[in-house]
Amino acid sequence: MFGKVHNIFVTIALLGLTTLLLTGCGDTPPEPRLETAKAKAEQCVEPTDVMRKDHMEFILHERDETMYEGIRSSKHSFKGCINCHIPAADAQGKPVNYLTADHDLNPEHFCATCHAYVGVKLNCFDCHSDNPEGAAPADSTHANVNGNGGVAHE
Amino acid sequence: MSKSSNIDAYRRKFLLGVAGTATAVTVAPGLLLRQAGAKAPSEEISDKNRWGMLIDVDRLPNGGQGVVDACKKEHGWGDEAHSNDQQKAHWVRTVHVKEKLTEHEFDLPVMCQHCETAPCADVCPTGASFRREDGVVLVDKHICIGCRYCMMACPYKARSLVHEALFDQKAHSPRGKGTVESCTMCVHRIDVGRLPACVEASNGAIIFGDLNDKNSEISQALKARGGKQIRADLGLNTGVRYQGI
Amino acid sequence: MSSKKVIYSEVENSGIGYYGLLALFGLFLLGGVIAFFTMEHNGHYITGMNNQTVWGLPHIFAIFLIVAASGALNIGSIGTVFGKKIYQPLGRLSGLIAIALLIGGLVVLLLDLGRVDHVIQMATGHLNFKSIFAWNMILYSGFLGLVGLYLWAMMSRSRLAKKLYRSMGVSAFTWRLILTTGTGSIFGFLVARQAFDAAILAPLFIVLSFSLGLATFLIILMAAYRWTQREVGDAILNRLRYLLAVFILGVLLLEVTRHLTNLYATEHHGVEAFILGGGNLYSNLFWYGYILFGTLAPLALIFCRLLKNSRAALLLAAILTALGGFALLYVIVIGGQAYPLVLFPNAEISSTYFDGVITAYKPGMWEWLLGLAGVALVLIIITVAVKVLRFMPLSLADSVVDPHAK
Ligand code: SF4
């Protein structure tokens, strides 16, 4: 049997695919923009090829450890990925969100770059912040944000 | 700020998270849980501890509005733009009580009481509502289906469904549309040996600590002066106790 | 089996009537699909449901359909389990209606969830066996399977099917009793709320399932036979008529008992005064909706001598029973939530978050669309099924169903 975590991953992937099939028909995949990722590759917690293949395994493993065992020292932490990989602001000083104001995947966002390309939709950011800690910005693409955290869209 | 210095700042912050208590002590000594049994970030929780809170309502000014505000600030709930007043999230609220016969009045903050036999965890079909080994009742939003049965079961109205899509959540407190949430006893803080936000804001009116440790400040205070549970008749053996109610 | 003379056949209608009916149901179904996607996209803030009334109109529809599902199976069970020959020709239809109702109810329940996408994970082991809700999921799937087998045993010509007929009927019947107990227990286990904290809710739900199931069955039976120009005789209808009366009285008995026992326990006085005391939506629904129109009126229609053998009276009685049951569920489930939680007995409590006050719930458009789509789905399943398989006896005339009729 597959492990629990594995199953969840497969489920998420299948879900993502289905959603994409339902909603994304006709969209051509955008070119992946990997500059941000490449710039950080050296500093990452694991070698690039390992990360490419297994990052979700790491995150999900860390997730269960933190959620159920209260361990908050793992180097494979979701928060860590975001804090390191997502800049606090783009060249214009605007925050880089996972979705654009039109609810499309934002190719500038590290996670969205690849996931848009491979067509696997993420639902991490339904609950998790897509921005580095403390950068909950005064003028993200999400209007109405007052820096309070968990503020609604539009 | 230039881009590279931004990156450095984030790397620093990231390392800080990893480095654990030792680093944290030097950064914020005042905010630490200075007590035997405080947990290191790398440590696994266990049922040796049972975290609890003792709230002295007489010492909380303004019915405890200050701790409510602190919680709001820490977790970012309550400002949902589309939800109406009945739909907005409330992790904690102050309740005014007036006894009919005696006309005695008091105010108290009401939140998740972190029951030992939590009705929410019993009824939850998926197991998303669960009680951590150290007694903290949480919702695993990764598996919560948003059925709200736990909200039906909770005697304290401590739980909220998020009624709309959220953005820019606090990194330490993920919250999202369609899932149920409630007071987490600030697990992200107590797991690294810090005090919950409300305790910090309470000027000593709330004692946080280990109910299993008979020498802890909270156990001593409870032993000396007692502490009431709301709806003790339900036999839930809550982790949150009150004095002055 | 007894019904040698009974010939089953597919429905032959295929004109505007038949497809018009399907199109109408389809329209309602479409409304539900739109409601689902709108709610899924925006979140529940667009509905009238909130953190005070967490279960709203969709849940009333869902509970109604699920409870009626187990009740609809009774008609078949009376024939199979209790050997009453006159009911046996109705067995297939009863099984079909039961399955359709259950699917409709479950779909409504499912589509109201906050995170439907997370449900799949339950199949990968995220099930809490302490939860009566999780047990219900298992009970529901088991019900679908068992009734399916029961239908097969009734409809297949194989010798194995004949041999298993009775045991299948018995297991489906037993299962349905457990299932309704489970549904009732969903509320009975909520000790925190004054309105639900009563063991009697489980038997109440069982008897309620008898009456709602039969009422629904009657409405569908009479409509189906009229629209297909098939004959139903008085013998069978009058049996069902008096059975309905017995069930209505049964529900009334348990409901009265429930309120009386509640009035005996001091801690329930508040909520009883609220529901029975008048002057609000829930007591109106209770007294007028459930008692007057949902109980006394159908009883009068059934027992009035002048209306003996009147089909219109029977149909109206069945419709009123169903609506009355709906009202009763609304009072129990939503009225029970409108009444505030008692944090401190013998005290007045207040807060900025609706503590100590009776809260208002007004179902919005999306909830109605979702609930009605569940009903539409039930009817579509039945309408299609009777056309492709032999569920309906060609005739239910007295001479066919009742060997003793002249
Ligand atoms: S809403 Fe979520 S946490 Fe609550 S009972 Fe349902 S699945 Fe469990």
Image (cartoon, coloured by chain):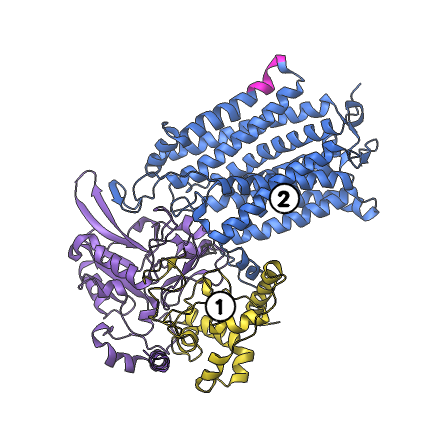
Chain colours: A yellow, B purple, C blue
Where is residue C200 shown, x and y percent of the image?
47, 38
Q: Which residues are magenta?
A: C300-306
Name the residue type under label 1: Asn
Instruction: Choose top left, top right, bottom left or bottom right for residue B236.
Output: bottom left
Location of the N terminus of chain C by quadrant is: top right
Where is residue A27 shown, x and y percent of the image?
60, 64
* Looking at the image, residue C332 lies above or below residue B202: above
Residue C302 among magenta residues: yes
Q: Which residue is mark 1?
A: A106
Location of the C terminus of chain C by quadrant is: top right
* Looking at the image, residue A129 lies above or below residue C109: below
The mark found on residue C174 in the picture is 2
Q: Is B216 placed left or right of A142 in the picture?
A: left
For the point 60% across and 23% down, the residue is C316
Determine if marks 2 and 1 fall on one subunit. Answer: no
B167 or C238, which is in the foreground?
B167
For the point 45% across and 31% down, the residue is C257
Q: Are marks 2 and 1 in contact (CB under 8 Å)?
A: no
Q: Is residue A45 among the parts visible in the rendering?
A: no
Q: Main secondary structure of the magenta part?
A: helix
Q: Is B227 placed left or right of A39 in the picture?
A: left
Q: Is C361 placed left or right of C147 in the picture?
A: left
For the point 78% across and 39% down, the residue is C390
For the point 49% across and 45% down, the residue is C185
Within 8 Å of ligand 1, the CB of disc 2?
no
Residue C146 among magenta residues: no
The mark found on residue B19 in the picture is none
Instruction: Choose top left, top right, bottom left or bottom right for residue C278.
Output: top left
Where is residue C199 shown, x and y percent of the image?
46, 41
Q: Tell me which chain the residue with mark 1 is part of.
A: A
Kindly state the secondary structure of the residue where label 2 is placed: helix
